[in-house]
Image: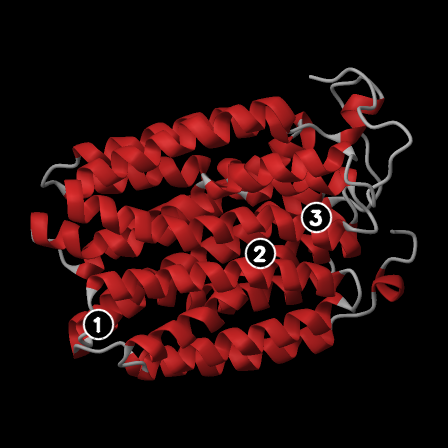
Amino acid sequence: MPTSEPSPGLTEFDLGYYGWRVVLAACFGTMAGFGSLFVYTFSVFVKPLSAEFGWSREAISTGFAIAAVTLGLVSPLLGRWIDRFGPRRIILVCMTVFGCGIASLAFLRSGLWQLYVTCFVLGVVGNGAAHLAYSRSISTWFQQRLGTALAFVMVGAGLGAMILPVVTQAIINGAGWRAAYGSLGGLALLLGLPLSWRYIHERERIAHKSSVATHSGITWQQGLRSLAFWVITAILFVSSISMNGAITHLSALLTDRGITSTDAALCASMLGASSLLGRIAVGWLLDRFFGAHVAFAVNLITALGVFLLARASSFPAGCLAAALIGVGAGGEAAITPYLLTRYFGLRGFSTLYGLTWTFYAAAAAIGPVILGRAFDVTGSYASLLVLLAAALGLAAAMNLLLPRYSDFAPDLP
């Protein structure tokens, strides 16, 4: 670990600034973490697991739901630990357990309990191997270019969403789903873990040579008493139901409508590509325009994508719907930590971010399960997807209720 300021005289506008190395390490760590490696490849395994064990799609989706609910329940505690001990220690432990957990899915047998227990463990450590932990470190290195920096961290998840579904499908086609799970677990351990160990540090801990960093801002208890926090959380909740439901069932939905498994995986890859572009574009916009207005536009784009997916019956239509949903998935990942930092500062940032993840994860559990249930009962996803798109459109308008940063907390940057 560096013992002094690693980039003296340089600012966040210089490429040699150490903070950009932290961004790059966080980018690849996020790519190999829960939000990318587990979430975006889950739909590719739905049909192979169903064919192997005879499990229903609702039963398999319940595994995703268990991981999501557990992640949501644990995230506030994880956030408190990150605020107290710093992100590096938490990331190293969680990434190790996460990689081993993913690899262990290669040894699944016919009992659903094994899938559920593994998903529970993945949920416990998930946000310690995702952008909740990495965002804290990034936010200590950047002020004027914070939106761009957070966006580039989220690029890792976009790269994973673009590349991993196609690679995973290719491994499944060639060597089976067990080899695919083993390969994904190895990726987490060999890519995310070493980079996080080498580069993920908070600026204050380096500059002051201390294991404890102090930050400006309000406490997490004060944050919970603010309208802004609950507006941000409510929008995130509705968005999560829609996005995670659509993402989890994307491959199965498209193949049901006559699209080949390879083309469906390409649609999932398109979602990842648009997520990647969305993260970069939204980060650029956040540094130039009021964040709530950027969020309003992003949520509307996501709602349109979910609506189009309800009607998609061809490869081009599936790609378009996936691309629009991807813009929302990518943009939302940068918007939430950015708004929390701007409204509340860094003092209780990770705790508040963890609490938003509780609601996000609960919604992420609900979305896939209700869509799986809708299919098992009616044989179609269409009606529920239209309803979710309408709900997200209404939630988008709630962004207009958010105050200006200076009006809410004039003493914060």
User: Which badge, 3 or 1, comes first in the chain's sequence?
Assistant: 3
Residue type for callout 2: Ala
Identify the residue shown where x is 54% and y is 81%.
393
Is the residue marked by circle 1 packed among few (<14), some (14-19), or many (20+) residues within 10 Å? some
**Please, is residue 411 above or below residue 235 in the view?**
above
User: Which badge, 2 or 3, comes first in the chain's sequence?
Assistant: 3
Q: Secondary structure at mark 2?
A: helix
Q: Cα distance, mark 2 to mark 1? A: 29 Å
Mark number, residue 340: none
Q: Is residue 270 left or right of residue 155?
A: left
In front of the other: label 2 or label 1? 1
In front of the other: label 2 or label 3? 3
Q: Secondary structure at mark 3?
A: helix
Is the residue marked by circle 3 packed among few (<14), some (14-19), or many (20+) residues within 10 Å? many
Residue type for callout 3: Ala
In front of the other: label 3 or label 1? 1
Q: Is residue 339 left or right of residue 61?
A: right
Could you say where residue 29 lies in the image, as x and y percent from the top left?
52, 36
Q: Splitting the image into 4 quarters, where does residue 44 fall?
A: bottom left
- In this figure, which residue is indicated by the disc labeled 1? 259
Residue type for callout 1: Ile
